[in-house]
Image (cartoon, grey):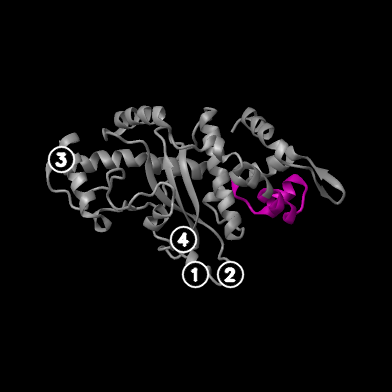
């Protein structure tokens, strides 16, 4: 981000923070914010950040947790599901991008690595790839901003359960009249074209996750807070991601992600949803 971006973030957060004392010397809110931004951007150990900024390791940990909590208070201002007018615009933008009609958002999950929790339920955080994580559900706009984020589930939790318990839920990750999944075995021409359009459009959220993780390297390294604080850090970075996108900050280059999700297909779908998808593909993508 630019210095101007950082200055604006400081202006938004300063009223929410007070000066902490370290050996009798106050740490200004602006320095606390800059320390936290460095940690989020670099993902380095707290000791390294503390040495650079002249504060102790435990102080950096405390500051990062406090500032991230303050950033999360801005969530309602920067992460919003589209209203009716915005939905109409999103449908046009998504269609121009991937030729898939009627889309107001792309949904997917990704795993953010955390250290092994020191609690009795630690193994529940171990994901399908055998490392500890928070399973994050995100919905993106055509401009690769978060319109919704859920970051509170253990790594072993199935994506469909996260969706089932989110505010977006209707009848789960199964195919419905509002959430479209790809065909597992496309046969007819319209099904193949449907899958091609679906894959292209869905690629936007994979790109958003890549930009988000590269902008905030702490998400690629292992978060070393207890799980509840890890979730706060994750949401804080999503808020900052949207803020920077809205400021026109250039996206970082995207690295290959070793946590590519396979989209959930018809194995979990209900019959009504499958019939609706067939009719949709035949009418709109034939």
Where disc 1 sits, the SS reads helix
- The label on residue 155 is 4
Name the chief secondary structure element in magenta: helix
Crowd class of label 1 (few under 14; some 14 to 19; many from 20; radius 10 Å): some
Magenta highlight range = 42-65
Marks 4 and 1, how far apart in space? Answer: 9 Å
Q: Which residue is at 55% across, 38% downward? A: 76
- The label on residue 190 is 3
Q: Is residue 46 left or right of residue 248?
A: right
Q: Is residue 245 left or right of residue 197?
A: right
Crowd class of label 2 (few under 14; some 14 to 19; many from 20; radius 10 Å): few
Q: Earlier in the sequence, mark 3 or mark 1?
A: 1
Give the residue at mark 1: 123
Where disc 3 sits, the SS reads helix
Q: Do we see residue 210 in this rendering?
A: no
Marks 2 and 1, how far apart in space? Answer: 9 Å
Q: Earlier in the sequence, mark 4 or mark 1?
A: 1
Find residue 36 and report its horizontal and vertical position in percent.
66, 44
Residue furthest to the bottom in view is 120
Residue 71 is drawn in which quadrant? top right
Contact flag, marks 4 and 1 (Cβ < 8 Å): no
Q: Earlier in the sequence, mark 2 or mark 3?
A: 2
């Amino acid at each position: 981000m630019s210095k101007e971006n950082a200055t604006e973030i400081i202006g938004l957060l300063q009223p929410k923070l007070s000066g902490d004392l370290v050996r009798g010397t106050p740490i200004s809110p602006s320095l606390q914010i800059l320390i936290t931004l460095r940690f989020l951007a670099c993902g380095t150990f707290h000791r390294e950040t503390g040495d650079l900024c002249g504060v102790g390791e435990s102080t950096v940990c405390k500051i990062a947790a406090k500032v991230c909590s303050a950033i999360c208070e801005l969530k309602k201002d920067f992460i919003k599901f589209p209203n009716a007018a915005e939905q109409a615009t999103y449908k046009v933008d998504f269609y121009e991008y991937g030729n898939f009609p009627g889309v107001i958002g792309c949904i997917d999950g990704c795993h953010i690595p955390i250290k092994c929790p020191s609690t009795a339920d630690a193994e529940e955080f171990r994901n399908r790839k055998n490392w500890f994580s928070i399973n994050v559900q995100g919905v993106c706009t055509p401009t690769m901003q978060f319109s919704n984020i859920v970051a509170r589930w253990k790594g072993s939790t199935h994506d469909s359960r996260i969706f089932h318990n989110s505010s977006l839920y209707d009848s789960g990750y199964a195919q419905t009249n509002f959430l479209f999944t790809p065909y597992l075995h496309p046969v007819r021409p319209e099904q193949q074209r449907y899958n091609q359009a679906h894959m292209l459009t869905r690629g936007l959220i994979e790109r958003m996750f890549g930009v988000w993780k590269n902008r905030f390297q702490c998400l690629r390294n292992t978060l070393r807070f207890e799980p509840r604080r890890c979730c706060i850090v994750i949401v804080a970075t999503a808020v900052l991601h949207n803020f920077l996108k809205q400021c026109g900050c250039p996206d970082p280059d995207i690295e290959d992600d070793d946590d590519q999700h396979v989209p959930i297909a018809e194995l979990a779908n209900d019959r009504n949803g499958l019939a609706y998808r067939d009719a949709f593909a035949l009418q709109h993508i034939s």
